[in-house]
Each structure stands twice: as C-alpha cells, then as structure tokens.
Amino acid sequence: MNLADIFVALEDDLSPLTEAHARHDLDVEAIRLRKSDALSYWSAELDVINPGGGPFQPGAKRAVIISERDEDTGALKHVLSGYLEAWPIGPAGRVVTLTVLAKPKNAEAVTRAALLPVQDDPFNLFGDPAEAFDPSVRLAARSATLHWSRDALAAPELVDIVDGKPGALIDIGQGYIEDGLRFEQLEQPVERIDVTLRASWTQALLRMINVGAAMANDGRFVTLQPPEWRDVPRAGQKVGDWTVLRSSIETTNLPSGLSALTPAYQAKGSANKRVADTQGDETYAVQFQRKAYDLDLMVGAVLTAKRTETITFSLIWDGQPLSGTSGRVETIELELRNLEARAELPEWAAGVGYQNGDRVEADGLRWQCRVPHISGSTLYANFDNWDPLVLEPSVLGGSSVGYFFGQPSELTIELESGGTQNIFRNPAPGPAALAYAINRARAQMLSANRLVRAVVEVPWADVRDALQGMERLRVADPDIPGGEMTGKIESVEVDLVEGVASITIACIPGRGRRDPVAAVPLYGSRGFDNVGVLRADVVNDYVAQEAALAAGQGAAGKNLVSEINRNATRFEIELMPVPKGGDLAVTIPIGVLALDAPKQIDLEAAE
C-alpha cells in the first residue's frame, strides 16, 4: 500500500474516526502492527523521521489514530487507536521508532466491568480480593483470556481459548500468499497433570455427654439416705475439663417388686434408743425407708482441632499422540483460603435479656436462643435456653450446612432438644473448588498441548476487518495432516506498507470427545478423637447400705443410722480429658480423569 494512503493523526484524546483524521501529522517511514498472547492489547511501531533535535516532543497530543484508505472503495478504514507509550532521543532527520499501545485510559475500569460477571471462583477461595480483577487469575478456570478490540473505544470481549466465540473464525482456506505457510510440530506435550487441592481450617465443636445415661440403669438408683446430694455437680460447675450443662436428681418409682421398707434389723443398746426409758441392753427392730431417684447429668466441652483435608487427582492427555515423543508431568497445588470468614456475632454477656432466635458467640461456638430469658452468670447456667448452631464438619464435602461462603438459603433443622433451628445453608465450597481445580488443570494442559503451529502470510486487505476480536483461523492445504487445521491465533504482525499480515496459530491434536466433568467426591471425613466417660458409678446404693446394716445389727453400741451415713450413696465420675487442639488430616484420592480436546488438526489422518 502507498504510504500516502496510511494516515497517522495526533489528537488530545481519542475520538471516533472521521475524515478529519485522514492527515499526516507524522512523517512515517513504516508501520508495523503486533498482537500476541503476551500482550493483551494491539500495539503499533511507527518508524518516523524526527522533526527536531533532542527527544521527540509530541506535546499534549499523545492520542494516535491510525487509518488507511481502501484501495477499491476509497473509504477510510480504522486501523488502530491508542496512546504513545515511548519515544526515543534522536537528532533531527533521524528515523526513530515510536510505540503506540491500543490501551484505553479507562482500561482498568473496563477490565473490572468485563470481569465482574465472571464467577470462576465464586467463593474467593484461592486468592486475595485484589486478584479478583487480574485476568490471568480470574479467567484461569474458564480457560479463557481477555482480548481487546483494536478500536480503543470498544469494550473488551471474553473469548474462549479453545473454541472461540460463535462465529469467531477467520476462514482463509487456501487464500494465503504463495509460499507463505510454515508448519511446525513441537516435541514435548504434557501427558499428565497431578493436582492437589488442600483446605485447612480450625474447627470448634460442642461435644455433649449424658453421664446419667452412661451409668447402670440409666442413672436410676435406690438409696436409704435422705435426699441432700450436696456432692452432685451443679449446672455451670466443672468436672475435669467438662462443664456441667444440666444437673438434677428427681424422685421416681421404685423398681417393680421392691418394697418401700427394708427388712427389720435388730438394734441393741443406748446408741439406738428409740424412747427415753429404753435400757442399754434392750433389743428392738428397726426398718428404713427405700427411695428411688433418677440422676440427669449432662456435661459438655468445646473441642477444637486444626482440620486439613486434601483431595488429589490426575488429569491425563487422551488426545492424539505425537509419535516419537515422551510427555512430561506437571503439578498444580491449590490451597483454599478465607475458610474462617463468617458473619460477626456479638459475644454472650451476663444480665442481658435474650429473645428467641438471638445469636451469640461464647466459648468458641455460636449459639441461638430458643427460650426468652435474662442471662445468668454463664451461658451454661441457662443451657436449656440455647442451642449450638449447626456447623459444617467438612469444607470439601458433606452436608454443606454452616457459615462458609455463597448465597445462603434458609433451612430448618430439628434438634435433639426437641426444638428447631433456622440456619443458613450455603453451597459447599468443596464442589466449586474441585470444579475450579479440574478446569485449571484442563486449561493448563490445553495450553501446553497446542503442539502444532503454523505461520501463514495473507494479504492484509483480506483479513483487516475479520481480525478484530477474532480468535481462531482455519487454513486448508493438502500438505497439512488431514488437509486443514484450525488454531488459536497466538500472534499477528502486520506490515501496513507491504500490506501483509503474518498470523501464527497453534492447534491441539485432540479427538473431539467430551471433556471430563467435575464430580463431587464421596468420602467419609474423620471426626474428632473419641471422648466420653471413663467411669460413672453409683457407689453405696441400697444394696450396699443394707449389707452394712445386716453386718452391724445386734452389736452393742453399733448405731445403725450412723452406719448408713458412713455408707452414704455417692457418685464417682471420671471423664476423658478434652483434647487440646491437635491435627486431623485426611487425604482423599479421587482417581484419574482423561482429557480430550476439539480436533483442530488430524495427525492420525492417512497420508
């Protein structure tokens, strides 16, 4: 093309192309356009004759609008709009190279707007919030990349790196410049990617033990002792590492067949006087009353541990092989972050009037009020008025009930206390994280296995309008395996003076079968170490007491009432110590997934 038909206009800022831009503000010797994966924007190199000595001085006019006149129609065509990024020092008359980048001044805002609806990592599990608008991070799982139109005034477009967008295909067939096709095949594909997905978080869980139920007869016993029970722990008191949540001893019916009175025991002597005139050596009969009781003793403790769950899998290449080559193995390691993030709740406080549904934090747990009350000295003093909120025991899988991430929905849970609890059910991060990991491996393998490249030179006029925003190009030639190839456009270089565009495409030798689908792993997550009752016994019940009475009856000076007191009914309770932290590590291998890709070139075609 004649340089007279290529226009470079300097402006204060960019504006839509008009005939007013058809002027030569710079003395241009050559213009080269470039676009590559490494640079998300089109750029232009302008060889111009320096109009003056010293540094090139464009003044305030740093916006550049490049256009050309169509040789056939005479219409003014837009080539590139951008801003001067660099200019060298050179004497007057020296040819210097200026760089123009088609990056709008509002590029950051436009990028954020384009990436905002992209939800490849909706839980923000893998990066800091600042990375949310980094295209290389945000779009990794979607196997996509951000492309800008050559018109700096246009919004960016998201284009899939494998298939492109509908219609985003330049079909030049065999319409390339003679001897302008160069074909090459790379030698080392990726045959396997090993992926590790790990989540670590601190988990707190309220473990409750019904001590009475752990005793013989479920805590029911018979005694001859008056019901004082001063040694029974009360609500809020500690038993070892455990806190008493509920404590009561209530009378109940005697076991069937057991009479209310003991047999008559022979008492003798003044120690057992019944009336004032009884002689010291007089013998008489004494009976005691049997009473039945039911012990209700519930204790609880907050267990904490650092949980680490790891999912591993491998993605293997199942496309066409490259003969005579050996593939390499790559790895991806992903760590879920922000798993402790959750809505803030107020700390429980004494002397506060709590209403049904109020939620608080206490002792490392979250609680929901089930009975309106004014709080006592501790939450456990009013334990029956509270329910611990149900938390998700596993991040990577499970029932997904808890305060993690996602859009919540209301869920009603029936509790052991007989009440109900309305909680938020969130989408579990695990399945989303696994889908992210699979897509991340898929994108990495597809990118690495673009093993066939072709460089084709075509007339600039043939592709000038088609290149803008396009992603794939198809070339037909009998020397290509299978007769044609369709590849991702990796780079474009345009010599506007010669009117030639050199386009590099890269192809994946797939077979066109379906890609693997992310599946939710099925596994059992290890729970906390076993904790519970070491010993819970009723000592000296009525059987032991009556044995002592039988042994002491009839002996002079033996006080039978004192004998019962010496053998008073008591409780011996020993609970397991509460684990102090510790690690719970689980690794779940979920197998091997096979990856195929669209058949962009057929290396297995018969020659």
Image (cartoon, helix red, strand yellow):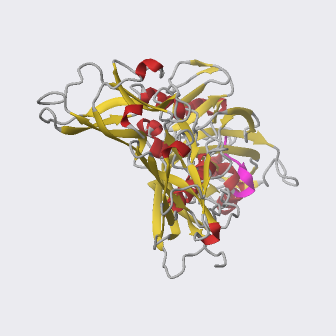
Horizontal relation, residue 163 to residue 220: left or right: left
Magenta stretch encompasses residue 218: yes
Magenta stretch encompasses residue 416: no
Residue sitting at the far right: 257
Residue 477 sits in which quadrant?
A: bottom right
What span is colored magenta in the figure?
Answer: 216-227
Report the residue at 66% width, 75% height from top.
Answer: 605
The percent position of residue 353, horizontal first and vertical second, equals: 59, 17
Which of 559 and 155 lies nearest the eye of the viewer?
155
Which of 270 and 364 lies nearest the eye of the viewer?
364
Residue 404 sits in which quadrant?
A: top right
Query: Looking at the picture, does residue 319 appear above or below residue 41?
Result: below
Query: Looking at the picture, does residue 149 appear above or below residue 455?
Result: above
Which of 326 and 346 lies nearest the eye of the viewer?
326
Query: Looking at the picture, does residue 71 appear above or below residue 201?
Result: above
Report the residue at 34% width, 29% height from top.
Answer: 83
The percent position of residue 249, horizontal first and vertical second, equals: 68, 40
